[in-house]
Structure formats: C-alpha cells, structure tokens
Image: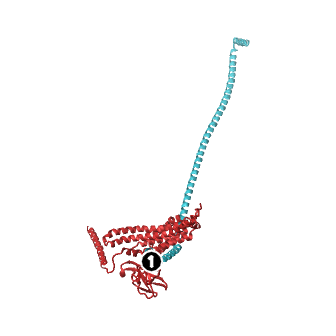
Amino acid sequence: MATHKSSKITVALMLMLILNSFASFAQLDTEGVVDESFNPTEMIMHHIGDSHGWHFFGEGEDSFTLPLPVILWTDEGIATFMSSEFHHDVEGEYVVDANGQKFVNYHEKIYVLNEGEELLKYDEEAHAALNANATFDISITKNVASMLLTVVLMFILFIGLANHYKKSKSAPKGFKNILETLVIFVRDEIARPQIGEKKFMKFMPFLLTVFFFIWITNLLGLLPGAANVTGNISVTVALGLFTLAIIIVNGSKDYWQHVFWMPGIPTAVKPILAIVEILGVFIKPIALMIRLFANITAGHIIILSLIGLIFILENAGVAFISVPFAVFITVLELLVAFLQAFIFTLLSALFIGMAVQEHEHH
Amino acid sequence: MDLITPDYGLFVWQVVVMIVLIFLLTKFAWKPVMKAVGEREASINDALDSAEKAKEEMANLKADNEKLLQQARAERDEMLKEAQDMKKSIISEATEDANEKAERILEKAQITIQSEKKQALFEIKSQVAELSVQIAETVVKKQLDDKKEQMALVNKMLDDVKLN
C-alpha cells in the first residue's frame, strides 16, 4: 500500500515538473523581444543540416557545443580557426579575423568579407552576399566529424575482427561472430548472387566498406544530438559516384556495346536506344543517391516533426502522444538504417554485376 | 534548397574518407577476414567430404563383412551337409560290409556244417556197416551152431539169389 502511494506521488511530481518547465518555456517565448515564436521548419532544417560546431543542447551563448575546426580555402591561402570563434552566431554578425581576412558565418555558410568591409550585407531576395565572397569550405563540420567517428569505429571493429584470425582459425565468439556473419551476409546474399561467382571477389572490399559505412553512419545518426550524414546529399552523391566510377572502370566490352550500339535490333532504333542506355548509366547511381538521402532525411524529419508538435501546439500533453510515436518511428528507423545500407549495397552490386557480365550472344 | 544542394567541402571529405576506408580496410580487414572465412569454409567442406567418404567406406566395410559372414555361413552349411552325407555313406557302407561279411560267415558255416554233416554221415555209415557186420557175424555165429538153422539160412540165401 505504501509503495503504491509513493509511486502515485512520484507520478504527480513528475507531471508537475514537466508542466512547470513547459510553463517557463512558454513564458520565455511570449516575453522574448526578438521574434522567438517557434519555427518548426527552421528547427528541422537546423537539425538535418550540417553545421560548423557540434551542438548538443542549450541556446545561444549558454549552449553546449563541441567546437570543430574550420578550414577555408580562400584566394589568399588556407585559413583555419575553431568554430567556437563564431560564438554560435549564424546570422553573420560575429566577424572572425584569421589569416588577415575577415570571416562571417551566415546560416552555416562562411563568407570572406571584401577588403575594408566590417559587416556582412546580405540580400535575402537574391540569396547572395553583397559585400562578401563564398569560400571553399573544407571544415571538419558536424557531418565530417561524425563520418570520422564512423571511420574510427570501423577500424576498431574490423581490424579487431581481422586480428582474431591471426590468433585462431576457429569462428569468433560473441560480437565478432555477429560481424563475421554480416561480412558473410554481404558476400553470400549481396555480392555473389548479383555479380556472379567469377568476379564478385574483386568488388567485395567496396561493397563491404559501403555497406558498413552506411549502416554504422545511419545508426549513429539516430542517436540524440547526432549528425544526419547519410541524409546529406553531398555524402550520397559521393557514394553514388563511387558506384558509377566502378561501373565505368570495370564495364565489360559487351556492356559498352549494349550501351552504345545495342546488337540485334534495327539500325534505325540503335541511336535512340543508345541515348536511353547512356542516360541509364547515370540515372542508376543518381537513383542510389536520392534514395539514400531521401529515406534517411525523411526519417529524421518525421521524428523532429512529431517532437515539434509539442511546441507547435504549445501543450505538454501532446508529448504523451507524440513521444510514443517518435519512439515508434525511431525503432522503425533502426530497421530503415539497415535496409538502406542493404539496398544501396545490393543495387550497387546489381549494377556492377550488369556491367561486368559477359553476355552470351543469341 | 540548401537541403538538395551538394556542399563541396562535405563531398570532398566523403570521397577522401571512402578512399581511405576502402584502401586501409581492404589491406587490414577485408582481405584477412575474407581469407580466413574462405579457408575455414574450405576446411569445413573438406571435413564434410572426408566424413562422407569415411561413412561410405564404413558402409563398404560393413557390406564386405556381411558378405564374408554370408560366405562363411554357406561354407559351414556345406561342410555340415558334407559331413552328414559322409556319415550316411559311412553308415551304409559299414552296414553293407557287415551284411556281406555276415553272409560270407554264414555261407562258410553252412559249408562247414555240410561237410561235417557229410563226414558224420560217412562215419555213421561206416560204423553202421561195421556194426552190421559185427551183428551179422554174431548172428551168423549163433545160428550156425544149429545144423538146421544153418541149412535154413543157406536155403534162404539161395532163395534170395534165385529170386534175383
């Protein structure tokens, strides 16, 4: 009986706490001088986009953000400084001096101010800076840092797995066994059936790397505060181009003949089909890029929207509905994380298999 | 729009990361892992094959054994049969032999009996003759004591001769 009572009290206290914190949040909103009303689009875009610092929680100067190095390739050489020097400013108000130049961060795009300018003038209509130039930004952004984290993880996991075989010839136990099973899965379920017994071994390193890179990055992306790497078009474009490059380099004579001058059809149709086939060569990897980007980004947007509902409706009670929904979608995203890695690798293998195949002439 | 505009910096990093990953992981992870897994699979297949072979050999051996046993059984049966036959033939031979011998003995005995009988008869005959002579002598001696009787006898003898 006593425990029952105490649990009831705990629930009541928790509810009070939630409502109280929400009330203070709402007050802050209404009392704010600047336009502080909640903008869901901005919040979502901020979360799925890239940034120069790794923001975890908090607002403005109080926020907890991991500073990351900014590396800029300008006309006057390479300029480097830590992202913390912008002091969380993304409105182009805080000017950083480095390498004898002045830099501002405007919505995570870094501009170098023209000679003699002290403040960024930005044309909102034309989406262009008036007195500054864009830089070639090769900073370690949040996405790059997350990517490097995946690289470190992959090294630890798979070189660890490889080291196991130095010690013993038998199958590894525990987690390493799972890794080995996944490696065998990529080999036997993806590479072997799609590319064929003769040639699949040559493409195993690429397929394994891509599969585990996408999967691990997807999973890391689901952690709170993590980056949306595989949901960034630049990343998927790079991955898709790898597949395209492999297809172009390894395409058999037969494959190119089928692309440019399809045998066995009337000559008049051949040029038309060649156009279609050449387009097809590029559309295949483009489909890969868009599929991965759209799936991962969509998942993030859904979760953020569900959480955003609480603030849009300005009612903590919504949390009781939207949080379980968000949890459900997150669990679903765990599946999607694997599925997208699998599909990307499977289709890459399929396209490579089509390109390296030696056709039998009928 | 930012969402679908590729960012060159990130793109460059991704390309670099992928090249480094593919290169280093191929060297330090994928190749050793694939090699070890392949070798293990080959050894498992070999082991399975040899187990299958051993099983086959075992079956062959068993069949051979069975065959040998069958053969031994057949041989034993044949030997038994032979022995039986031999026994039968020996018994019948012995019986025949014994019969023959018995017959021969009987024959011999009969012959002996016959000859003994003949001899006995002969002896009896000779003894009877002697006895008759003695008797006749005695009778004659006695009868010749009387003249009349002598005469009667002589007459009678004469009569007999006449009648003949």
Category of crowding for the residue at label 1, using alpha-carbon neighbours closer than 10 angstroms: few (below 14), some (14–19), many (at least 20): many
* Secondary structure of the residue carrying numbered label 1: helix
A305 or B90: nearer the eye? A305
From the viewer's perspective, is B152 left or right of B81? right
The single residue placed furthest to the front in the displayed view is A268
Looking at the figure, which quarter contains the N terminus of chain A? bottom left
Image vertical order of residue A21 relative to residue A113, above or below: above
Image vertical order of residue A132 relative to residue A331, above or below: below
Residue annotated with mark 1: A145
From the viewer's perspective, is B107 left or right of A195? right
Residue at screen point 26% across, 69% down:
A5
Chain letter of the red region: A
Looking at the figure, which quarter contains the C terminus of chain A? bottom right
B150 or A113: nearer the eye? A113
Can residue B104 be seen here? yes
**Chain label for disc 1:** A
What x and y, as percent, mark residue B37?
Answer: 52, 67
Image vertical order of residue A272 relative to residue B94, above or below: below
User: So how many labels did they put on this image?
Assistant: 1
What x and y, as percent, mark residue A123?
Answer: 41, 81
The image quadrant that residue B107 belongs to is top right
From the viewer's perspective, is B83 left or right of A302? right
What x and y, as percent, mark residue B155?
Answer: 72, 11
Chain letter of the cyan region: B
Q: Which residue type carries mark 1? A: Ala
Image coloring type: by chain
What x and y, as percent, mark residue B135?
Answer: 68, 19
Residue at screen point 52% across, 66% down:
A350
The image quadrant that residue A336 belongs to is bottom left
